[in-house]
Image (cartoon, rainbow, N blue to C red):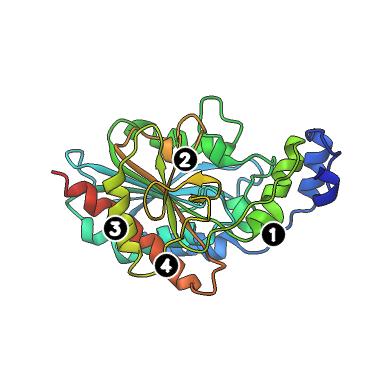
Amino acid sequence: MTNEAFYPIGTPGKPWGAAEVAEWRSTQHPKRSYADEVVSVIDALRDRFDVSEYGRLDYHADKFPLFAIRSRDWDDSLPIVLVTGGVHGYETSGVHGALRFVDKHAADYGGRVNLLVAPCVSPWAYEMIHRWNRDAIDPNRSFHDNSPAQESAALMKLVAPIVDRALVHIDLHETTDTDESEFRPALSARDGKAYEPGTIPDGFYLVDDADSPQPEFHKAIIEAVAKVTHIAPADDKGEIIGSTVFSPGVIRYAFKPLGLCAGVTNAPYTTTTEVYPDSPRATPEQCNVAQAVAVCAAIDFALGQG
């Protein structure tokens, strides 16, 4: 299969240059409001949490400030938990699940952990409902030195002081039907490669760190989330999205070598959640709840290790 057969931008077999990126960008238009749907929710939390601006996207600085939410009673003697959402802006429950956790559950951990939450790492992509940033770069492959993605660079700067102090980092994501209908075809076209169709798993799953796996940690999260939504089964190859399933609902990627957000700290307990919002068995509210439950389970397990 060639690029020509599945994506309208670019020349089959040839990676995109500046002209193709510009053409792609011209097709992107806001479909929802970061200010109305995200910033307004963050603003409503200011009476209970410390909210700070940790950067602004050059695309439109006034429109896309980047916000972090912190425990008001920050205590340097306590462990640190980092929660990130919206690294891929189109993954809605990553953003609103993080905000739900702060609103509904963060107070439960007062005096036990310091919370640092970046609920919408990629606000431009949130508005466009896209995986990439404005430069057709995937922020979740860009968490490395000299990052080409403003979103990734800003988050790395934010977390630099806690890289070696974090106990938990949970990065909230989704796998959607549009991964196959739009985003993976676009990726193949951008990189000048042939597109190989895949399958979308129906249900929640987790990505563990292949270089430092924590099977019991992931088991605890899966068991908690299974009470609110279904867990994705392995396919007939024993895989989820082409990766081996090591235990129910758990696959592994090498976080740091791949430049994934989940590798942005040296926390001993790290994971990436993946919710399936297009399932007929899950509502948007269930997806948000599943994300928040996953965060709680991750913290509870880590604190229970003594």
Tell which residue pokes out farthest to the front in this image: 236
Q: Residue at x 62, y 61 (%)?
A: 177
**Dot 2 crowding, Cα within 10 Å, few <14, some 14–19, many 20+:** many
User: Gap between marks 2 and 1, in whole Å?
Assistant: 25 Å
Name the residue tied to disc 1. Answer: 30
Q: Earlier in the sequence, mark 2 or mark 4?
A: 4
Name the residue tied to disc 4. Answer: 230
SS at mark 2 in the image: helix
Q: From the viewer's perspective, is residue 120 above or below residue 13?
A: below
Identify residue type, mark 4: His
SS at mark 3 in the image: helix
User: Gap between marks 1 and 3, in whole Å?
Assistant: 32 Å
Residue situated in front as seen by the camera: 55 or 120: 120
Q: Earlier in the sequence, mark 4 or mark 3?
A: 4
Identify residue type, mark 1: Pro
**Any mark on residue 296, and which?**
3
Name the residue tied to disc 2. Answer: 261
Q: Horizontal placement of 11 versus 239: left or right?
A: right
SS at mark 4 in the image: loop
User: Gap between marks 2 and 4, in whole Å?
Assistant: 25 Å
Q: Earlier in the sequence, mark 4 or mark 1?
A: 1
